[in-house]
Image (cartoon, rainbow, N blue to C red):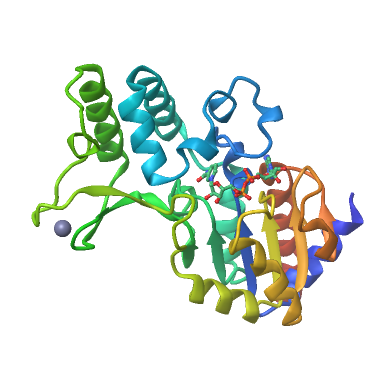
Amino acid sequence: MDPRIDRVADRIAAAERVVVLTGAGMSAESGVPTFRDSGRDPGGLWDRFDADEIGTAGGLLGFLISKPWEGIEFLKDLRDVFAAAQPHAGHIALTELQRAGRLDAIVTQNVDGLHQQAGSERIIELHGTFARRRCVLCGLREAVDRASLLDAFDRMIVKLGSYMVAHPAHLLDRCVCGGLFRPDFVAFGEAVQDLDAAVEAARSAEVMIVCGTSGVVYPAATLPGEARGAGAFLVEVNPDDTELSAVAHERLRGTAAGVLPGLAARVRQRLASVV
Ligand code: NAD
Ligand code: ZN
């Protein structure tokens, strides 16, 4: 068995505060495609659609209005991703670590709500979530369950297909104040959410596990450095080298679903043996 897993399990079992930072790779095995390793998913969503073009809120709406047929294809694909995504063994392993008292917080860049679905708590969603919508006028935020999200996609798809959409406003639902609702995720160029809480979690961590992030999206990519600077032991879980590999104390080369369950099991063994 890999001695590195044992070393990391020792650290986690002994630590008061463990924090996990997750990125798109955490959800890859749930069928949610990542942005930056499209080689793993040839022909996948981000192979066919340019994340840089449609990653901004204005870019996305402009794309939908100006290229409705491509827009429909994109929305259908995204709808299918959300319809099918379920937490995998790696998400569940984090929930188990938390229930064993060995995971303080999860800071995630993901917008898919899979950590919540797996039963984890104390989740800081830096890039917001599709499980909520926000009025762009009055700021009202409302939870959106999976069925309502899929319904919103379906209604947008029907409207785009009916040639009735001359303006982005026609695609979106309205708040009681008259403003437009948009999904409460953070698009490219927008300010992240809950950054103070994320930085505080990073600085207070004794161990930080960084899983499935390429480390090129800021300010999320500064968090491992914040943690390490404050004395944390830094662990990377990723099948590939990333921008963050050089600052990690331990690199576990594997996938989230491949590595995290074994790691959590080892931590539980250690906790059981000290009782
Ligand atoms: P990224 O797409 O830039 O990089 C993905 C990383 O995950 C890579 O380092 C890759 O090697 C690694 N990876 C791939 N498969 C993995 C697996 N099975 N297990 C572990 N690691 C794996 O991801 P990022 O750094 O999170 O940046 C992408 C940005 O786009 C984020 O801001 C995020 O908000 C957004 N995004 C979110 C989702 C989602 O919500 N699931 C999906 C795509 C993009
Ligand atoms: Zn409003």
Residue 203 horizontal side relative to residue 237, left or right: left
Q: How many marks?
A: 0
Quadrant occupied by the C terminus: bottom right
Quarter of the image for residue 138 reads bottom left
Horizontal and vertical percent for residue 155?
22, 28
In this rendering, is residue 169 above or below 20? Answer: above
Horizontal and vertical percent for residue 235?
77, 62
In this rendering, is residue 185 above or below 53? Answer: below
Residue placed at 77% from the left, 67% from the top? 234
Q: Nearer the viewer, residue 151 or 194?
A: 194
Horizontal and vertical percent for residue 247?
82, 65
Residue 213 horizontal side relative to residue 98, left or right: right
In this rendering, is residue 78 above or below 174? Answer: above
In this rendering, is residue 93 above or below 255? Answer: below
Quarter of the image for residue 240 reads top right
Residue 119 horizontal side relative to residue 177, left or right: right
Residue placed at 69% from the left, 75% from the top? 227
Q: Nearer the viewer, residue 126 or 163?
A: 163
Residue 54 horizontal side relative to residue 94, left or right: left
Ligand 1 located in image quadrant: top right
Q: Nearer the viewer, residue 90 or 195?
A: 195
Residue placed at 8% from the left, 54% from the top? 176
Horizontal and vertical percent for residue 97?
61, 62
